[in-house]
Structure formats: C-alpha cells, structure tokens
C-alpha cells in the first residue's frame, strides 16, 4: 500500500511539473523550406522533426513548436542537442521565437562541430538563453572558449596560439580571459527588462564573417568580433539545447534562416 501511494504521489508531482512547464501559443504548422517576403526560409515545419536529429527522450513537436523537456526522471548527465541536418550558409541571419521555463537553460548553437562518440553533442558558438535572464543574448562557446561576450558586452577576441585541447588555462569563472571588452550595450537592468518572463521572445542572430551579433526583442545584447584564427570557425552545424540541471522546458517556434552575403 505504501509503495502504491508513493507511485501515485510521484506521478502526481510529475504531472503538476509538466503542467507548470507547459506553454500555450504556438502557431499553425507551416511548410519547411517556404521562403517569406524577407528572404527567410523556414527550417522547422511545425508538424514533424523532419531534417532534425535529436534524442526523442527530450525533443518533440507540441502545438506546432519544437519543444525540449527535461523531467525529474530524465535528468541529464551532459547537455543534449537536436541538430538541423540542412546546409548552413557561411554568413546568415536566424530569427526564432522562444519561451523558456523559469529554471530553464538552453541555447542556439551555430558553426558548431559534432563530437565523435556522442551523437547529440555540439561544440561551438552559442546564442545563450535562460529563464533567469542572466545569460540571454550572450555569446557562449560550448565546450570550447566559454563566454566570448557576456550580456551587454562588445568584445574583440584576439589571436592566441592555443589549440582547442589546451584552452583551460585561459578560462576563469566560465569567461574567456583573453577577450577584450571594447564597449557596453547598456545598463544591465535595462537590457534585462527587454526580455519577457514566461512569454515569447524574439531571438535574432546575425553572423557575417568573424562578426556575430545577438539581439533579443530587437535589442542588441552581445557583439563579438573573433580574430582568433586558430579557434574560430566559419562553418558548422546548427542545433538547440536542453541543459544539465533541474527539470526544464524550452519551446521554439517560427524558426527561420536567411543567407547573407
């Protein structure tokens, strides 16, 4: 009897959690590959995971959204990505809307490498985002140089003759120490106020050559010029992340990509 009660209680808690983390407001499914008037192509059709590869334990389609969920029963030992299988142009603009739970942590990786032996891991540039709004808009290089620009920073990444296997000595508190902060994009409190809680936010990522800019709801949050010729990349995969930590939920909708010159 005690065991049955515990099982019922556990099921109830999980149900409440998923209810709290559920989101409304995803839009009607649209055909992937459809180009709009601004030259963007939709890369998620809102109905299937066609052309996306990830662990089905965490990734699914719900209400026309690409959704990642971590529950108490599926806590992660390492971050997990769902990876787009299409061809990424070298220079591009991404527009996508996201909604993340309060304790959620996710990100949009681009120009990233797959890691041998781990089919759902990526290493590379990331347009960061989190429910607490501490990192949303920053430029974080997953499994590599870490933070290249925190929220509100304009930075230059100088050349450094260190290969990817010898980077740790140049990292402290999850920050890439050689980066040079050349400017500020505004007061931190003002920047955070541009990010909506428990609502949809627009992420715009503009990548041209070695220059990367991340915008949230039209506000520039980070600006990186990467002059590190050893460690920077101009090509690679696009993917989105569920993160190690507490249960979380992330939803993406209207995922669009445009090639830039």
Image (cartoon, rainbow, N blue to C red):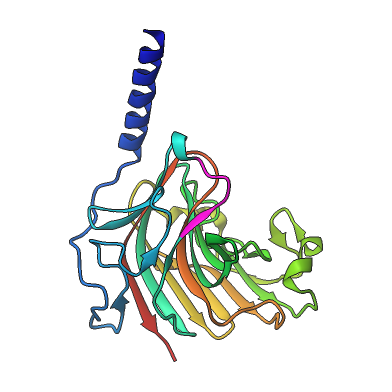
Residue 11 falls in image quadrant: top left
Q: Quadrant of residue 143?
A: bottom right
- Looking at the rendered image, the quarter that the C terminus falls into is bottom left
Give the residue furthest to the top.
1
Residue 200 seen anywhere in this rendered image of the structure: yes
User: Which residue is at a point 40% across and 47% down the rendered structure image?
Assistant: 57
Q: Position of residue 163 (x, y in %)?
A: 76, 74
Question: Magenta segment, which residues?
Answer: 75-81
Q: How many marks?
A: 0
Residue at far left of view: 28
Predominant SS of the magenta segment: loop
Residue 217 makes an appearance in the image: no
Q: Position of residue 239 (x, y in %)?
A: 46, 65
Residue extending furthest bottom? Answer: 261
User: x%, y% of residue 58?
Assistant: 41, 49
Please name the residue shown 50% across and 54% down the image: 80
Q: Is residue 94 left or right of 121 when viewed as pictured? A: left
Q: Please provide percent x and percent y for residue 68.
A: 39, 51
Q: Say above or below: 121 vs 232.
A: above
Against 51, residue 171 (above or below) is above
Compared across the picture, whether 63 is left or right of 154 comes to left
Front residue of this view, candidates 193 and 42: 42
- 12 with respect to 242 (left or right): left
- Magenta span has 160? no
Residue at screen point 31% across, 62% down: 49
Image height check: is 79 above or below 152? above
Quadrant housing the N terminus: top left
In the rendered image, residue 77 lying in the magenta stretch gets the answer: yes
């Amino acid at each position: 009897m005690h065991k049955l009660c515990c099982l019922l209680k556990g099921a109830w808690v999980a149900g409440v959690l998923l209810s709290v983390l559920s989101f409304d407001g995803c839009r009607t499914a649209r055909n992937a590959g459809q180009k709009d008037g601004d030259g963007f192509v939709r890369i998620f059709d809102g109905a299937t995971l066609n052309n996306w590869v990830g662990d089905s334990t965490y990734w699914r389609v719900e209400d026309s959204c690409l959704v990642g969920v971590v529950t108490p029963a599926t806590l992660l030992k390492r971050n997990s990505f769902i990876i787009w299988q299409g061809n990424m142009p070298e220079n591009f603009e991404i527009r996508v809307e996201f909604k993340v739970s309060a304790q959620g942590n996710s990100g949009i990786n681009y120009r990233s490498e797959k890691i041998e032996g781990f089919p759902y891991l990526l290493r590379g540039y990331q347009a960061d985002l989190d429910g607490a709004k501490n990192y949303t808009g920053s430029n974080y290089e997953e499994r590599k140089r870490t933070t290249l620009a925190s929220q509100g920073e304009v930075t230059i990444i100088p050349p450094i003759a260190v290969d990817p296997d010898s980077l740790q000595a140049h990292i402290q508190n999850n920050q890439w120490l050689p980066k040079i902060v050349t400017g500020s994009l505004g007061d931190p409190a003002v920047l955070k106020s541009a990010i909506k809680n428990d609502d949809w936010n627009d992420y715009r990522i503009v990548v041209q050559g070695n220059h990367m800019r991340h915008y949230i709801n039209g506000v520039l949050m980070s600006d990186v010029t990467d002059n590190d010729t050893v460690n920077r990349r101009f090509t690679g995969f696009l993917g989105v992340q569920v993160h190690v930590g507490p249960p979380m939920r992330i939803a993406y909708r209207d995922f669009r990509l445009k090639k830039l010159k």
